[in-house]
Structure formats: C-alpha cells, structure tokens
Image: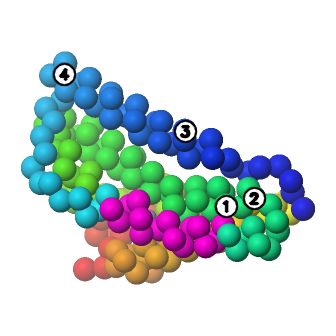
Amino acid sequence: MGSEPFVGCGSIFSILRAMKELTTLLRRLSDQKLLKITYVQRENLTVKRLFFEHFPLALISGLLGFAWSHEWQCIPAALVAGWMLDADHIFDFARYVICNRPNIDMSLIRNGGYFKVNNKVLVPLHAWELTVAMAIFGAVLDSPPLITAAIAHGAHLIQDQGAYKVRPLGYWFISRTMSRFSLNGFCKK
Ligand SMILES: [Zn+2]
C-alpha cells in the first residue's frame, strides 16, 4: 500500500490562495483602468452549485477510500479531485477576460455566462482521460489515494454530465479538441 500523501490540505489552500490572488489582480487592473469591471446580474446560483453540489459525493468517496485503505490521504485526494475540480473554470473565465477586456462583467463568473460569451468550453481537467490515468497509475503504484481520487473525479464527471446536459463524449478531452472546444459540440440542444 502506498503510504506517501498524494495530495494534502496544502493543495486546497494553494487553490484558494491562487483564487484570492486572481481577485486582487483583477481589482488592481480595474484600479489602473485596464479593465472596466461591472456586475450586471447579482444571481449567485452557480457559485452555490460550484461549491456545494459536488462536496457531498467527494467526501463520501474520500471516506469510503479511507474505510477501505485506512489511509487518511484518501480524503483530501477525493476532495481535490472531486470537489475542487471546478477550479479549472478559471481557464474559461480567463479566456473571457482576455477576449473581452476592458469591459468585464464579473457577474458572469457567478452564473457561468462566460461559457456562452466565449462560445467555447475548455475546462481542461474535466476529462475522462484524467480519470483513467489516475485509476491506472493508482493500480500500478498501489496507491489508494490515487484510486480514490479517480473515483471522486469520475463521480464529478457523471454528476456534471446529467446536470449540464452534456453530449455523451463531451467530457472526453480528445472529443472536445475535435470540436475545437465549441459550446455547441459540448452540450445537447
Ligand atoms: Zn464540474
């Protein structure tokens, strides 16, 4: 059994720190008039979904991994792979900022409207290839945290697949590259 931690709480804190730094950077760019930041809408639905819809399943995956292997690292591994996975929306939001500056509507980060404006879906970590790779490496390295991470990651993708009416192959990265990451190639009509 692998005993080295795959990911620790440090990973979660690094992601949160990066998000805080990004917010500070956006505010600074706005102060220097390089970005004009507005909030057209105030709805908070997606933020709530981003932070709470995947947490229970990721935690259950981690606890099951822990119960099976007695390795505590399974819990943070599942939380990072199954819950914090949505941090990769930052790539899509960054594309929105780059392509639409200086007029940035920050309310789009709350409702996911930047996907529509971009007309593309990047989310590079939402990929079954990653699930498969983690499962294979987890089995080869005999690492319960990595196998637990693969299960939590797969559970997140299945949950998203149903919630966002994604085409059957939408969460395969190779399929998204073939449709040039187009929004229409990702979602069902
Ligand atoms: Zn997701």
The residue type indicated by label 2 comes to Trp
**Magenta stretch prevailing secondary structure:** helix
Which quadrant of the render holds ligand 1? bottom left
Q: Name the residue tied to disc 3.
A: 14
Q: Name the residue tied to disc 1.
A: 75
Q: Is 56 colored magenta in this rendering?
A: yes
Rate crowding at label 3 as few (under 14), some (14 to 19) or many (20 or more) other CA atoms within 10 Å: few
Q: Are marks 4 and 1 in contact (CB under 8 Å)?
A: no
- Quadrant for the N terminus, please: bottom right
Marks 2 and 4, how far apart in space?
44 Å
Query: What secondary structure is marked by label 3?
Result: helix
Marks 4 and 3, how far apart in space?
25 Å
Q: Residue at x 29, y 62 (%)?
A: 46
In this view of the protein, which residue sits in the foreground, 66 or 35? 66
- Looking at the image, residue 9 sits to the left or right of residue 90; the answer is right
Marks 3 and 2, how far apart in space?
19 Å
Query: What secondary structure is marked by label 4?
Result: helix
Q: Residue at x 51, y 61 (%)?
A: 83
